[in-house]
Amino acid sequence: MAAKLNYLYIDSGAMYRAITLYFIQQRVDWADTYQVKTALDSIHLEFVYNQLTGQSDMYLNEENVEPMIREMVVAEKVSEVAAVKEVRDFAVAQQQKMGEGQGIVMDGRDIGTVVFPMRS
């Protein structure tokens, strides 16, 4: 759908996976609020359309990490990392920023209630 509309496809789960990958690589203790906040300051997330696959790839600090974020080591920890309030706040802010000024199709939990809540 996103490709037909020429919109960016955003998989919010991929964002949490990329953050988890970074935490694992940098040995961040996600139970330590200071370490989490410091690590989040060093993270830049971006989706880049891949013409070969027809999908958006997740880039972490300008590196395509799409294959790495699908590995079991990340899958086993992503729920723990995503449960951290500072991580959720960071991810939501990133999602909102990605939605500014362009058409997007976003997949994930709480998109219509938290990320882009309906206004009455």
Image (cartoon, helix red, strand yellow):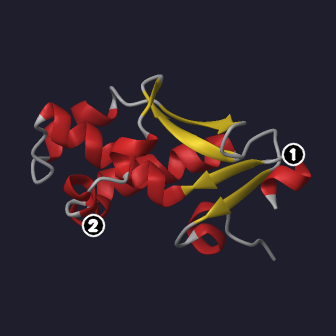
Q: Is residue 52 left or right of residue 57?
A: right
Q: Which residue is mark 1?
A: 6
* Element at label 1: loop
**Of discs 2 and 1, which sits in the foreground?**
1
- Amino acid carrying label 1: it is Asn
Residue at image x 77%, y 71%? 119
Q: Which residue is mark 2?
A: 79
112 vs 78, nearest the viewer: 78
Q: Is residue 95 left or right of residue 26?
A: right
- Amino acid carrying label 2: it is Ser
* Residue 92 screen position, x and y as percent: 51, 53
* Residue 44 screen position, x and y as percent: 45, 29
- Extreme top residue here? 62
Q: Is residue 70 left or right of residue 13?
A: left
The quadrant in which residue 43 appears is top left
Residue at image x 39%, y 57%? 88
* Residue 46 screen position, x and y as percent: 55, 35
* Element at label 2: helix
Residue at image x 61%, y 67%? 111
Query: Can residue 96 be seen at all in this image of the molecule?
Result: yes
In the picture, the quarter occupied by the C terminus is bottom right
Comes first in the chain, label 2 or label 1: 1
